[in-house]
Amino acid sequence: MAGTSESEQQTWVVVPALNEGKVIRRTITALREVFPKVVVVDDGSKDATGKEAIDSGAVVIRHPLRLGQGAAIQTGIEFALAHGAAYVATFDADGQHNAQDLERMLRILRSEQCDIVLGSRFLGRAEGMSRARFMLIKAAAVFTNLTTGVRLTDAHNGLRVMTAATAGRLRIVQDRMAHASEIIAQIGRMKLDVREAPVTVTYSEYSTAKGQKMSNSFRILLDLFVGWLLR
Amino acid sequence: MVTEMIIQIFLSALLLGVGVLAATQRTTSRMLRVTMLAVVATGAFLVWVPKATNRMAEIFGVGRGADLILYVWVVITLALIVFLYLRVAHLSRKLTQLARAVALARPVFPPGTARRPGEAPE
C-alpha cells in the first residue's frame, strides 16, 4: 500500500467499536492507507459495524455480548500479539483521530526506543471541544497524575502505540471506560518509559453525541474503586 | 399467653426453614454455612428470650433491645450488599474472559487476506 513502510506493516491497530456503522468505513479506509493491519473489535453492535469494517479491509472480532471498550481493547491486543505484531496501537472508531498522528507516534516510539507513546490533545489540538469537556478531561488528567504518579497532560486519549512487549505486559481488566486510567496505572506500576505526543482530536457533532457522557465519570471512579478492591 | 406465642412460633418456623436451608446447601462455603447457622441460633434464642436483647442493649449502651437488633440488622445487610457486589464484579470478570475466548476463536478476515504472516491467502 502506498506510503506504508516496514514498521507500519508490523503494526496492528486495534479499533474498538460499538454501533459505529455510519462512520467506521471512512475511519478504517483512511487508517489503512497508512496502517494496513487493522483489527476492529465489534463489541456486540446492533448495526452494520462489523460488515462495514470487513468491507473496508479490517479483520473483525465480535464479542458475543457487550462487554465495554476496555474489554474490546484487551481482546484486540491479544489478537494482535497472536498475529505477529511488533507494535500495537489503539485508535477510536468514530473518526476523532487521524492516521498521520499515529504514524508520527510510531516514529517516536521507534526513535526514542520507549515502551509506549500516548496521544495528547492538550499538547496538540482539540477541535470543537466544549469548555466543560476541557475542564473534565483536565481534571481527569490531574486525578490520574495524583493516583498513578505518571505525569501526563491528557489521561483519556484513545490514541496509543506500544511495543509488543508492552502490549503483552498490559492486562486490562477494567471492561468499561476506566481502562484509560487503568492503563496509565499499569504504566506507572511497571515503570514503563512513556512519552506523550501531540495529536489532533476532532470533535464532530457525531463523535460528541456518540462519545462519553460526562456523567460517566462517576461510573469510572466507582469502577476504579471496585477494581482496586478486587486487585 | 397463647396469642403472645403466635409471633414466636411464626418466627421460629421461619428461622428453622432458613437453618435447614443453610445446613443443606453444599454449594456455599463452609464459613458462610456456619455463620448462617450461628445467626439462626442467635435469632431463635432471642425470639424465645426477648428480654435478653434489652440486657445486651444495656451492655452496648443502646436504649432498647429492638434498637440493637435494628442496628445489627443494618450492619449485616450492608456487609451482605458489599459481599454480593464484589461477587458480581468477580463473576463479570470471568464472563469477560469467556466471551473474549469465544470472540478470539472466530475472527472474520476480509476476503483475499493472509490469515497469519506468511500464510497463504484464502
Image (cartoon, grey):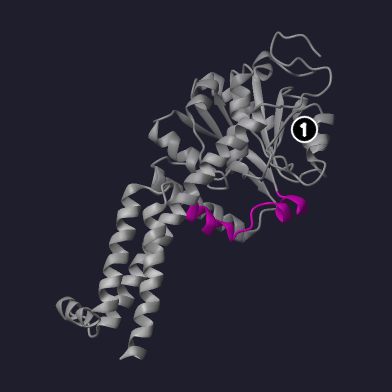
Q: Give me the chain letter of mark 1.
A: A
Indicate the position of residue A172 as horizontal and vertical percent values: 51, 37
Q: Residue at x 34, y 80 (%)?
A: B8
User: Most extreme residue toward the front, as rendered?
Assistant: B2
User: Camera-side residue: B21 or B33?
Assistant: B21
Q: Quadrant of the N terminus of chain A?
A: top right
Indicate the position of residue B112 as horizontal and vertical percent values: 83, 17
Q: Is residue A40 shown above or below B70?
A: above
Give the left or right position of residue A201, taking residue B81 as reference: right
Which amino acid type is marked by label 1?
A: Ile
Q: Residue at x 33, y 68 (%)?
A: B75
Disc 1: CA contacts within 10 A as few (<14), some (14-19) or many (>=20): many
Inspect the magenta stretch and tell me whether residue A208 lies in it. yes
Q: Residue at x 59, y 29 (%)?
A: A77
Quarter-wise, where is residue A189 in the image? top left
Give the left or right position of residue B115, taking residue A168 as reference: right
Give the left or right position of residue B36, taking residue B104 as reference: left
Residue A44 visible at all? yes
Indicate the position of residue A124 as horizontal and vertical percent values: 61, 41
User: Camera-side residue: A141 or B66?
Assistant: B66
Indicate the position of residue A34 as horizontal and vertical percent values: 74, 24
Part of the protein shown in magenta: A203-224
Q: Is residue A161 shown above or below B114?
A: below
Residue at numbered disc 1: A28
Indicate the secondary structure of the residue bearing disc 1.
Answer: helix
